[in-house]
Amino acid sequence: MLIIVTGVSGTGKTTIGEGLSNHFKLPFFDADHFHPEKNIEKMSQGFPLDDQDRMPWLQALANKLLESQQSGGAVLACSALKEAYREILQVNQQVHWVHLKGDRDLIWDRMLARKNHYMKASMLDSQIATWEDPSYGLHLSIDETPEKMVSEAISYILKKEAAV
C-alpha cells in the first residue's frame, strides 16, 4: 500500500502522514528529507524551487516509493504541487492520494509558529500560486482536527482497498 499526502507547506502533511503510517503500520517518509543540499540552501534563502530543481528530488521519491512497495508499502508526505510532479510519484495505479487544503491565513499562522524549518513562511504564496488542484483522491480541509482528518483518510483508503 502506498499513500501520498500532499498540500502546500504548513497544511499538516507530516502530522496526517504519521497518523496514517501508525494506523497502517507502514514506514513514513517526509519528502523534505530527500531534498539535495542545494535545494535546501535555495529555500533557506527564501527562493522557491523551480521545476529543474525539483526533478532529481521527485525521481528520488519515486524510487523510494517503488523500493517501499517491495516491502509492503509506505506513507509519503510531499507537497507535489503540480500534476506533473504527481505523475512522477504515481508509480502504480494503487497509490492512495490524500490532498490537504485550507485557508491561506491559517496556513500562514502555522508556518510562522514553526521553528527550525528551512521553508520560510514568505514562500507560501508562491506555493499556493503553483498548486494545481487534483481531480482525484481524498481532499481534506485542514479546518478539521488532525484526528478527524486521519480517521477520514483511513476510511477512504480502506474503501478503496476493498474495491480492488
Image (cartoon, helix red, strand yellow):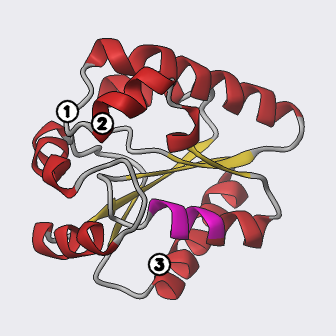
Classify 47 as above or below 26: above
Question: For the residue carrying disc 3, how many other residues have a C-alpha within 10 Å: few (<14), some (14-19), or many (20+)?
Answer: many
Q: Is residue 14 covered in magenta?
A: yes
Residue appearing at x 28%, y 17% in the figure: 51
Q: Is residue 44 left or right of residue 150?
A: left
The residue at which mark 3 appears reads as 149
Q: Is residue 95 left or right of residue 148?
A: right
The mark nearer the N terminus, 2 or 3, is 2
The residue at which mark 1 appears reads as 47
Q: Quadrant of residue 79?
A: top left
- On the question of residue 72 being in view, the answer is yes
Is most of the magenta stretch helix, strand or loop?
helix
Q: Amino acid at mark 1?
A: Phe
| Span highlighted in magenta in the image | 13-18
Tell me, yes or no, whether the two marked residues, 2 and 3, touch with CB atoms within 8 Å.
no
Tell me, yes or no, whether the two marked residues, 2 and 1, touch with CB atoms within 8 Å.
yes
Question: For the residue carrying disc 1, how many other residues have a C-alpha within 10 Å: few (<14), some (14-19), or many (20+)?
Answer: some
The mark nearer the N terminus, 3 or 1, is 1
Q: Amino acid at mark 2?
A: Met
Classify 113 as above or below 123: below
Q: Is residue 63 left or right of residue 123?
A: right
Q: Quadrant of residue 156?
A: bottom right
Q: Amino acid at mark 3?
A: Met
Please provide percent x and percent y for residue 93: 59, 32
Residue 38 or residue 92, whichever sits in front:
38
- Alpha carbon distance from label 2 to label 3: 28 Å
- Alpha carbon distance from label 2 to label 1: 5 Å
Residue appearing at x 77%, y 52% in the figure: 27
The circle drawn on residue 43 is: 2
Please provide percent x and percent y for residue 66: 73, 26
Q: Secondary structure at mark 3?
A: helix
Q: Secondary structure at mark 1?
A: loop
